[in-house]
Every structure is written in C-alpha cells, then in structure tokens.
Amino acid sequence: MDKLVKSIQEAVKLSGLKDGMTISFHHHLRNGDFVLNMVMEQIAGLGIRDLNVNASSLFDAHMPILEHIKNGVVTGISADYIAAGVGRAISQGIMQKPVQFRTHGGRPSDIALGRTPIDVAFIAAPTADPMGNCSGKYGKSACGSLGYAFADAMYAKKVVVITDNLVAYPLQDFSISEDYVDYVVTVDAIGDPKGIVSGTTQITRDPVGLVMAAHAARVIEASGLLKDGFSFQTGAGGASLAAAKFLKDIMLEKKIQGSFGMGGITGYMVEMLQAGCFRNLMDVQCFDLKAVESIRTDPRHLEISAMQYASPSSRSAAVDSLDVVILGATQIDTDFNVNVHTDSNGYIMGGSGGHSDTAAGAKLSMIIAPMFRARLPIVTDKVTCVSTPGKDIDVLVTQGGIAVNPKNQELQQRLMAAGLPVVDIRELKEKTERITGTPKTLAKGDRVVAEVIDRYGQLQDSIYNVPTK
Amino acid sequence: MDIKQIASAGTMESSDVYVEIAPGNGTLEISLESVVVQQFGDAIRAVVLEVLQEQQVDNANVRIVDRGALECVLRARVETAALRGKGNV
C-alpha cells in the first residue's frame, strides 16, 4: 500500500472532493501556516466550488481565503476564532451565509456527533512517515501539540497529511496514527517558523496590569481552591502571565503542589512545571518555542486532543477537572456576559476558542481586564455579542475593583474577608464612566454575518454586519 | 487670536491624542480622526472647541488624531498645541 502522493492537487483529486463538500484545517501553525492557502489554491485551480471550510481558527495569514469567497470557491465558514483581518471582511458582509463560530470543545463535539461532518481533512504535520503517523513535536516547522487535529483525523471521511519532514516508517513518537490517514503529501514548507511560534511573551511592566495581576493572584489565594492538587489555566496576555507569576510565588512560598496546568501552553507555564508548581501540563496547543521544546522532551508535559481538553460530549474532559481559569474580555456586561468576538466598533476580531469551555468547567472563572481601553469602558449594560454566558463567569478583576457574580455569594464573602476591594459591577461601571464619559451605543447592521454556537451545539447569539457609512 | 506658527502636542500612542495646529485662513477649521469617533466623536469636538475658545483661538487649522485619549488628556494636548502655536511657550 502506498499512501504517498506527488502533490496536494493529486491528493485532492484522489480524495474525491466535489462541489458543496466540507473540508477542514487545524491552526497549530497559527499565523505561520502555509497549508490552508496552498490547499485552497489547488482546489480553486481544479474548479471545485461551493465548499464549506471548517477551520479550528483563521488567522490573517489566511487572508487569501477572501478571494476564494469572492470567487464562490468557499461559501461557508466554521471556526472557533477569526483574526481581525479576515474578521473585518466578514463583518462587512463578504459571505452570503453566516459564519458559524464554535468553541474549542464544541467543534470536536459537533464533529464527533455527526452534526458537522467533514469530507476531507487536511492535516499540517511538522513530521510524518509515509503511512501517515505524524507529530507536531519534530521538524523545522515544529509546533508542539496537534490537539485540535485529532477530531478531524478521526471523523473525516478522507484524511490528507501534509508534511515538510518525511521520516522513515515508523515514526516513533506519533500523535495521530496511520490508521486514520488516507494520503501523505510532502511539500517544501508547511509554514514559516517565525509565525508558528512566538518568542517568549514578556510579563507586563505596565503598572495597571501589575495591579490587576496582583489582585488576580490574591483572589485565587482567597478562593479556598489554592491547595495541593490545584489545577490552573491562563492565557498568554501580559497581565495573565503576570498573574501566573504572582501565583507561582505564592505556591512556592506555601509549598503547594498543583496537579496540572492547562491550555494554550506558554514558556511561563513550563517554568511553573519545572519549579514544581504542577505535576503535569495538559497541552492542546503550544504558543512558544519553550513550550514546544518541553512537550518534546519532558514526559510530564502531556499532549491532549481538543476532545479531551474541552468537548462537552466526551465521557469526560479536562476542563471539568479545572479549578481556576483566567480569561480575557473585550466587553463584559452587568450580567457578567463576556464578549471576545467583536471589537469596540463591532468588527469580528477573535472568538471563543476555549473561553466558554473553560469558563463552564472551572470552579472559578475569572475575567481580568482593565477598567477601560482607549477610553472605552470594559463594563457595559449589554455586550455586543455573548461569547460566554454570564452564568459561567464568577469574578471580574480590574485595577479599580473586583466584581463578583452575585450567584457566587461564597466567593464574595471570602474575598471580602480577605480584605480585597470588592465592588458591585454596576458601581464599577459608573466609576469607570466618571473617568471616560458615557459612550454612545454603536449602530448595528441589519444582516446576520455570524452565528455564535455554544459548546453544546445551540445558537447562543448572532453577530450583525457593521454598516458602512 | 491668530496662530503664528505650526505647532503640535501629543503622540500617536494608544490612549493619547495628537494635536496639530497651524495658521488659519480667517476661520477655525477642525478635522477629527478618532478610534472612538462613534462613541465619543461629538464629545471630543465639543471639548476641542471649548479649549480653543478659552485660548481665544478663532483663526487656525486644527488636526486631531485621537487614539482613545481621556478628556483630561485631550484638554491638555489642545491647550499645549494652542500655546505653542501662539508662540507663548
């Protein structure tokens, strides 16, 4: 049996891809990814049209997809996150059919349940053997974990592995195994290493960010959850990392050993592992070189699939064992609903990713955000888009006070007993507007450009076009 | 009062505002570009006019490039640009 084919074009032909079908991609190569564009170019060249693209995320490296939309090659998009460049075009109404946003847990859940079947999955593999065993840990385009690609490999009707580092059979340390793979293609480069992994994100030195981070660490300390066995996820933003640093100091001082750190793994989480703050890291995606190095060499650093990470229809998912998650927000309303999909002018520039999944699973879901950014208050009466419902958010930490969701009275009592500056979220909003002024509400378009589907597969909110003046 | 020379204040940094003021053609011309024009455009114009009136500037071309500055920052930048334009500082 020979799975090796000469070109992407030949693999597309052999896969039987036809008009109207669904293809899928994963985003571990992030803004350095070449694979989605290469595949789309070949598909367009073959004259195949009306495709639905199910990508775990779209970055601005994928801007060429806009041409394929204009030309009718792509007529449907599903993604968990869409960066600002592609997002702007979608908000301006480039698609006839609304984009479907899912979460990192909802996407594999809906794939596994057959709600969003995939005809052909294209898997960017930094290393593969001729039978399709593949890994993200090795090769010049190494990205670490391949977590989001597992569901695609397991459930797509046809699976094409695309690699720039073909090794002899069998690849010893594979992530996705040959029994799921139909075809293997080698190309010169699957991505640009500079865009695949970033350098180490620096901990913020901004005094506002540091105050927020210090508050966040103290909230965790006061929550009662910080004890042996503690589990934790945080984002890669400067303030979130600063919170992790303060948390690390507390854990080392009190000699607390946690069970696991999870995410999107950064070098900072690797340092916490190495310092003994956690027994393990559970990793669905690596953000930087240090994380890639760690997952390759340290057996305590575990690769997990998106299904194990966050799927609500898995027998269990790691988010269900999570104690604390620190998350961001572009807006949060007085009912604690959070927006991470649209920017202050209503343009798409993000998505839930694992936001909703971790918020639903974690015992303590914390939003960390400044009171205002560029004169716009973070707290509003009603978010432009509900990305994560307020029922799953416990606390908002800002430099001007800590607002606890009234549903979590116990937390409120604990934080007040610890002497933390607890404030009602409506008071926080008023306090902020005394500094910024009260913003006028945005004009909303009249056409739905995207649907936000919650992790359980239900429509949660709709995003409207941004009217052009 | 006339503006004697081209002057500026502020930066293009986020949360700041860049104000440029130049001699006018007999009237006060204000151009505004702002990342928060939908939310605060009217408020920004009103404050700029108010500060220019305080400075008795009625003949100038004023260009405002706002990156989300708070009102106190905006007032300070406009006042400084006006004083510099009049040659007072």
Image: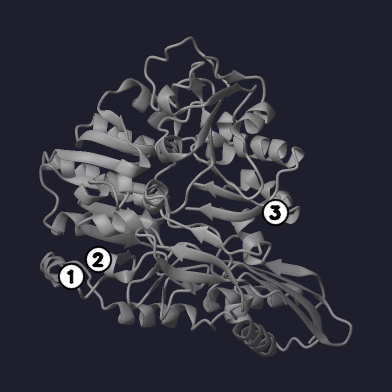
Q: Is residue A388 above or below residue A34?
A: below
Question: How far from the left and from the top, in percent, is residue A159?
Answer: 51, 32
Disc 1 secondary structure class:
loop
Dot label at residue A69: 3
Nearest to N terminus: mark 3 or mark 1: 3
Res. B85 visible in picture: yes
* Type of the residue with mark 1: Asn
Question: How far from the left and from the top, in percent, is residue A335?
Answer: 32, 77
Disc 2 secondary structure class:
loop
Q: CA distance from mark 3 to mark 1?
A: 45 Å
* Type of the residue with mark 2: Asp
- Packing grade of label 1 (10 A; few <14, some 14-19, many >=20) is some
* Type of the residue with mark 3: Ile
- Label 2 sits on residue: A394
Report whether mark 2 lies on the same chain as mark 3. Answer: yes
- Label 1 sits on residue: A408
